[in-house]
Image (spheres, rainbow, N blue to C red):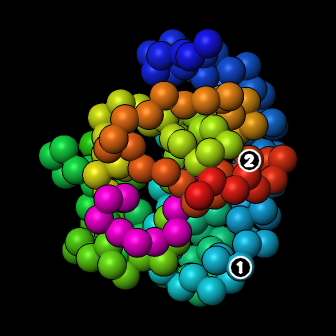
Amino acid sequence: MSIDKTTLRKQMKINKAALTTEEKIAESRAVERHIEALPCFATATHILLYHSLPDELPTHEIIDKWHSMGKTIYLPVVVGDDLVVRRYTPEAMQQGEFNIWEPTGTEVDTDILELIVVPGVAFDSNGNRLGRGKGYYDRLLSRTQATCIGVCYKCQIAEQIPTEAHDRTMHYIVTSEGVIKGI
């Protein structure tokens, strides 16, 4: 039986709300370790991450760690109906759209990106992603050839994600339990 996107979003909200702060931190650290073990991480210099919202897998420490490792980190910035990419500099951040912390620098071309870590409401083992419904990431990902890694709590893995033609598939899905190959 197939599930619609609205129902799936509601179920994932319930699943995430049941997680303790300790579980969220532990899962984030495990996801970080799994990504760092991927060959595509070892070779990537230019990585797009996201500055997590309270209900997303935490990334604040990951951003700082990878930045201090010498990786060039970029974050998405909401501009109108799209995401643009700006280089992360710890001292040049401001609160932007949806109260998300964003870099204040100039926009960079997505062609520079080698690896993109993507949040989602839910993912499946085929690499399909369910977002919040505005299509921000789908539009961004359609402009790049970078390797895409969807990250989430293990409770956000669904049996099947309903997809549409514009939905972008992840190369990998990573949870605290390990790496799920997408495409």
Q: Splitting the image into 4 quarters, where does residue 38 fall? A: bottom right
Q: In the image, 153: left or right of 121? A: right
Residue 160 % position (x, y): 61, 29
Q: Which of these two is toward me, 101 or 170?
A: 170
Image spot of residue 116 (x, y percent): 50, 65
Sequence-wise, the earlier of marks 2 and 1 is: 1
Residue 89 - label:
none
Residue depicted at 68% across the width and 28% down the height: 159
| Residue 13 appears left or right of 78 | right
Q: Which amino acid, mark 1?
A: Pro
Q: CA distance from mark 2 to mark 1?
A: 17 Å
Q: Report the residue at 78% width, 72% height from top.
A: 37
Q: Residues within 10 Å of mark 2 (few under 14, many from 20)?
A: many
For this orientation, the residue located farthest to the left is: 80
* Magenta stretch contains residue 81: no
Residue 35: percent from left, percent from top: 71, 65
Q: Residues within 10 Å of mark 1 (few under 14, many from 20)?
A: few
**Disc 1 marks which residue?**
39
Q: Secondary structure at mark 2?
A: strand
Mark 1: secondary structure: helix
Q: Check the image and report above or below for 14 versus 136.
A: above
Point out the stretch of residues depicted in magenta: 141-150
Up/down of 13 relative to 127, above or below: above
The amino acid on which the numbered mark 2 sits, given as a three-letter code, is Thr
Q: Which numbered disc covers residue 175?
A: 2
